[in-house]
Structures are given as structure tokens and as C-alpha cells.
Amino acid sequence: MNKISKVALVTALCLGSFGAVAAGFKPAPPAGNLGAVLVDPYGTSPLTALIDLNSKHPKDVVVTVHGKGKKGVEISYPVGQQTINTHDGIPLFGLYANHTNNVTVKYTLDGKKITEDYKVLTGTITNKYVDNRNISLMQQIKVKTVAKGFEDRLYLVNSSTYNHQGSDLHWSGQKTKDAGIFESSPALGSLPFEMPPINYIVDTQGQIRWWLDQDATYDATDIDINKRGYFMGIHDTGNGDLTFVSGQRYGTFNLLGQIDTKRLPRGYQDASHEHNIMPNGHSLVRAAKSNYINDRGDIVHTVRDHILELDKDGNLVDVWNLAEIMDPYRDALLEALDMGAVCLNVDMDHMGEKAGELAIDAPYGDIPGIGAGRNWAHINSIDYDPKDDSIILSFRHQGVAKVTRDKKVKWILAPKAGWKGELATKVLQPVDAKGRKISCNEKGVCDGEFDFTYTQHTAWLNDDKDRLTVLDNGDGRGYDQPALQEMKYSRFVEYKIDEEKMTVQQTWEYGKQRGFDWYSPITSNVEYMADRNTMFGFGGSVHLTKPGVPTIGKINEIDYDTKEVKVEIDVLSEKNNTPHYRAVLINPASQFGK
């Protein structure tokens, strides 16, 4: 064989060998008795991993992610067979970022009990929406109080940041019938209500133990409305995942980063604030109606005033059009709103200014106003009551109301001012613990131990105590603005409602004594936690109205009996005056135990 032939043969052999390898690179080898450890298995949750089963069948699995350092929080949870089957692996949740994590996995394999230790390396996490407004790259976390017995708590912070370009997308609407020929098409609906998400889980040492990649649900560099919106409305479904809404989409996600998304049905748009699951598995989503003909004959996109019931396939089962059920022209609270902070629409230039008289011919769109097509309702929470197949709604700009399946108002929890006709007969009467009437004026200022909620959020049932818990934000209290911003306060509050007698008793409250430094004008949530007998809540906008400072999201657990602060953790916005939304208490056993 000549020299050229030898070279050609060697080259061919090398290329052949390389081609064989290139066509079939081997997977990561087993890291123990099972398979490889795959960090961020679905590409959206970088502080999780999966131990591949490697065709084996472990049972009775318990995972422990060890804490970092002497005071690090250990996270331990069972992994159910359904979860293992779904992922063909064992989920590892609660890893630290940019760290070699120590993980212990116990399981039974072929009748033998096995304990294995793994070292799992993770990378960094980062906020991708940074500009000259940033005072820090990431949100800062300050642990104030953690009582004994609460060290294992984990809290999902549902927050956001501002994008670089601001609001750049609007729905183009039709002109009103009275519009002039030279008037441009109006911007309607609430499409500009969208911000890049910041979602993470924090432990009681202030360490981030889970992060959802921002690109998973949002992209400000494109004009695809399916990748815009505000990622919010998170609830633990009890089935190993959590709910969400985000603009034109709703769905569920799990902590490993899988996201199941559906588009809103045709004719509806702008989902935000709430997605709750009914006992039959149907979704209750707060959305709005597109191309709606209101009672003035104008074609509008409505704003935050429709509730959709959707089955698991996305079929629209039922609709509550609150513009027809309630009174969209009631302005008693609307006129008293602080125009500097209307939910997540924050305008520091108008902080402390009252809305004043609202014109019936004002522009349509996402502005406080009366009539369908404006933000007259601002429904921010939904809860389902299976006792009578009804829904309980928090209207930030009206009050709290219970509405039946046949679209009738059962009761209203709000001051009497502005309610007319049949709706006026549905307003609950405040009473004391002995059932005696408490005298209140039209605007809700009461003589006894009772206070209404104002611009409230999360009116949710507490089934353990047969009560209603509400986050009373407190803006427009008494349908007025105080002389000084510092006179405002927020509350966690609980009510007992007697639907036969049409009365309401205030049974528990916390927060008034904390004053302005605990005041959240917008967002926030509260609910009772039976496992530790606490009121768990999140004030998502503390100091939002103080110019030039980070907004505090305040995580609290308050002992129900003693009102002692068991947990207090502050999360600080990475841009000044940027609100957070809610927090959710996370139980890993609920997420992975099935």
C-alpha cells in the first residue's frame, strides 16, 4: 500500500470512528445504584434535579437536601410513585444556587433498603431584566423573626420587575359612537398590565431554594402576546402542581419546571390576579370580555370583571359577567382611591391624590372609572363555596360579594354607600359577638369592634373555622384619604357571616397596631394555616408610596391565639417602588408525595 493510500485509510478509519461516536454520544453515567443526576431537567427550574431511574423501580423514596452551613435549612420530603412514574426519576428540590449540594436519598429496591448520598452541582441564577433603575441585581432577603418550630417553612414569592421599554402593547379598540372623524382608535382593555416575572422560594434563613427561569413564561424582547402578561394567581392544587394566569394564558406548573398552558377561549382576554381550582377539577379564572357592547352602546374590551369556569380541556363551562350582576356605576369607593397606586399600576407623581368625581364619558381602558370598559370592579380573588355552588369575589373597587350559580348576589360585605335597589338589600349588617347590631355610617365608620375592608385582596374561605379571611389593604378607608399617608394601615382580618340573618361579625384582626410600616396599599394575601394555627400572609407593597426606596414584601405568620409574630421575613424589590404580588406557603410533600 502506498503512502497516500495509508493516509487515506487512516483518515477514513478516524472519520468512521468519529462519525459513530457523533451519531450516538453516550448519556451521563449512573451516579449511584440508580441513574444519572440531571440538573434542571426541563430547562426552566435550575435549582432542581432528577435522578434517572435507569430502568429500575425504587419504592418508598424519601429525599433530603441538606442545609448549607451550620444553620442551613434541611428540606426532606417523600416522593410518591405517581411522581416517580411521571418523571421517570426522583425529583430533587430545594438545591442552593452555585453550590455543590449534599443530598441523601433513601429508598427500597428489590426488597432491600438503600441509603445513598449524592453531590449535586448547580449554577448561578440571575435576573435578566436589569437597567439603570436597579439598586441590586436580585431581590434582597432579610430574615427578622423565625420562632422555634417554624424553621422548616418554605415560601414562594410571586413578584415581578419592570422591563426595559415599559408598556409597549395595547389592544386597539373601536371608536365610541360619539367619536369624531379625526379621533384615533382608542387603546382598550388591560394588555399593558404586564411585567417580567420574578418567582422564587425562600427558606427561613433567607436562602433562595427554587427559581423559575423568567424566559419560561415571558419575553419582553418580542411582541408575542402569548409571552407577555403578569405571572400570578398561584395556588397549590394538591395534585403536584400550582396554578397561574398570565395575560392571554392560564394553566399549571410544577416545581421541576414543567408548564401546561392554555389560551383563553375566543372572545375573552387579559387574565390576571386569580386562577383557582374547583373540587371537580374545573378552573375559575378572572378575565375580561373583548368586543363587549355595554349599556351605552359602545363596543369595548372590559377590564377585570368576568369570571370563567373552564374544564380540564379548556371548554368554557360557565361565565359570570359582573357588569350585569353588580352595579358598574357605583363609585362610592372609586372616588376616594389614591391615584398613585391602583393595583400594580403605580404612578408616583399622583401619590396621595383622590380620584374625585368620575365622568361617565371618560375614556375607556385600564383606568379607575365607572361602566363596563373601565376598571370599575377590579376583581382580584375568587373562592368557590361547595355548600351552595357559589363563588366569593373580592372587588378591589367595590367590596366582597357572594354570587350564586344562577348569577344572583347572595350578600355584600361593604359599607352601605352607593348600593341601590335589590343590591342594597344584600349588604350585610355588622354585629358583635352577642349578635347585637353595630352602628356604622354610610361610609363604613363604625362605633363598635368592627371595621370594613377597603381595596382588599384575597377574600378566601377558612374551612377549618368556617370563617372568611381577607387582606384589608386599607386605601380609601371610610371612603376618604387621611391628612397624612402615614396614617394608613392594613390588616389581616377574619369575619363570621350568618347568611340567614344577613349579619357579619369581625372575629379576628391583626395589623392596625403595626401602622404605616406594615401598610400595603395594593396586592398582598392572607389565609389561615391549620398545621401551625397561624394566619399566614404577605404584605406585597410596604413602603411602595415612599419615593426612592425599595418596596418590601413582608412574609408573616401570626399565632392565631396570641397574635405573636412567629415568622417575619422581608423581601426587597431590586428596583425602587416596584410592587410584589403574593406569597404562597410551599409543602414539598404536597408537590412530590403523590
Image (cartoon, rainbow, N blue to C red):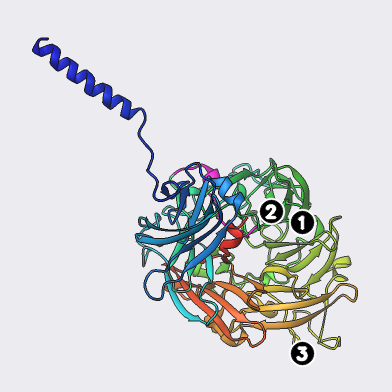
The reply to whether dot 3 and dot 2 touch (C-beta < 8 Å) is: no
User: Residue 208 placed where, x, y %?
Assistant: 44, 65
> What amino acid is labelled 3 in the image?
Asp
The stretch drawn in magenta includes residue 226: yes
Q: Is residue 310 left or right of residue 182?
A: right
User: Residue 45 placed where, x, y %?
Assistant: 46, 53
The reply to whether dot 2 and dot 1 touch (C-beta < 8 Å) is: no
Residue ID for mark 2: 285
**Going by the picture, which residue comes out furthest to the front?**
111
Q: Is residue 451 left or right of residue 587?
A: right
Of residues 97 and 59, which is closer to you in this image? 59
User: Residue 545 placed where, x, y %?
Assistant: 51, 74
503 above or below 201? below
Name the disc covering residue 323, or none.
1
For label 1, the crowd category at 10 Å Cα-Cα, with few meaning under 14, some 14 to 19 and many 20 or more, is many
How far apart, in angstroms, are the residues tagged by discs 3 and 2?
A: 38 Å
Total marks placed: 3
Determine if residue 470 is in view: yes
Residue ID for mark 3: 447
> What amino acid is labelled 1 in the image?
Ala
Of residues 129 and 41, which is closer to you in this image? 41
Q: Residue at x 77, y 57 (%)?
A: 322
Of residues 178 and 372, which is closer to you in this image? 372
Per the image, label 1 sits on a secondary structure element best described as helix
Per the image, label 2 sits on a secondary structure element best described as strand
First-in-chain label (2 vs 1): 2
State which region is magenta: 222-237
